[in-house]
Amino acid sequence: MRGQEPRSSSSCAACKFMKRRCTLHCLFAPYFRADEPKKFAKVHKVFGASNVTKILNEVPEPQRQDAVNSLVFEAEERLKDPVYGCIGAIASLQDKMFQLQHDLAVAKARLARCSTTRTSYASCSTTTSPFSMLDGDFGMTSLDIFVVDQGCGLTTEFRPHSLP
């Protein structure tokens, strides 16, 4: 049991921050070590010590470390972005994921196009633009690429359009 482990005589970061004496049964000590004072300061600034105490008391002991890690992440993100907090970080990561999925679909389309044309690998890889193969450099019509979510995953649709 982690909360009952013997500690050095040093107070935990939470007790130091709140300027109180750290006891053997301190709720914060296993999760806010003395050498990480900023970790508790961030959590305290966003949630307050009383709320953190309530949260930790409600969470089963085996899950407390995960709860503390979550509180620290939320506090850091809330301090970076007071309006959106971790939701802003999640939305940013989702945007990056969708962009990477699109880029992957384009790369797969290009690879498929290279393998279906009767050109050498060198001519496929030395084009000036990564999209020039899809823009008619090989005697084909240009293609618009659409990444479509059909419920079971992303697929790529190719729609030809006339060249200007």
Image (cartoon, grey):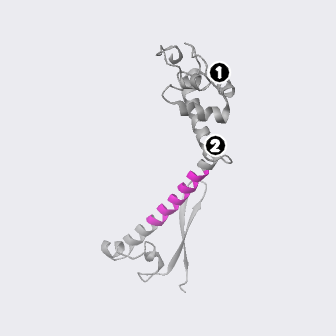
Q: Quadrant of residue 31?
A: top right
Point out the stretch of residues depicted in magenta: 91-107
- Residue 21 coordinates in the image, percent (x, y): 59, 16
Disc 1 from disc 2: Cα separation: 23 Å
The residue positioned 44% from the left and 77% from the top of the image is: 132
* Badge 1 element: helix
* Badge 2 element: helix
What residue type is disc 2 on?
Arg
Q: How many marks?
A: 2
Q: Which residue is mark 1?
A: 57
The correct choice, above or below, for 124 with respect to 9 in the image is: below
**Dominant SS in magenta:** helix
The correct choice, above or below, for 93 with respect to 30 in the image is: below
Give yes or no for residue 101 being in the magenta stretch: yes
Contact? badges 1 and 2 (CB < 8 Å): no
Q: Which residue is mark 2?
A: 78
The residue positioned 67% from the left and 33% from the top of the image is: 47
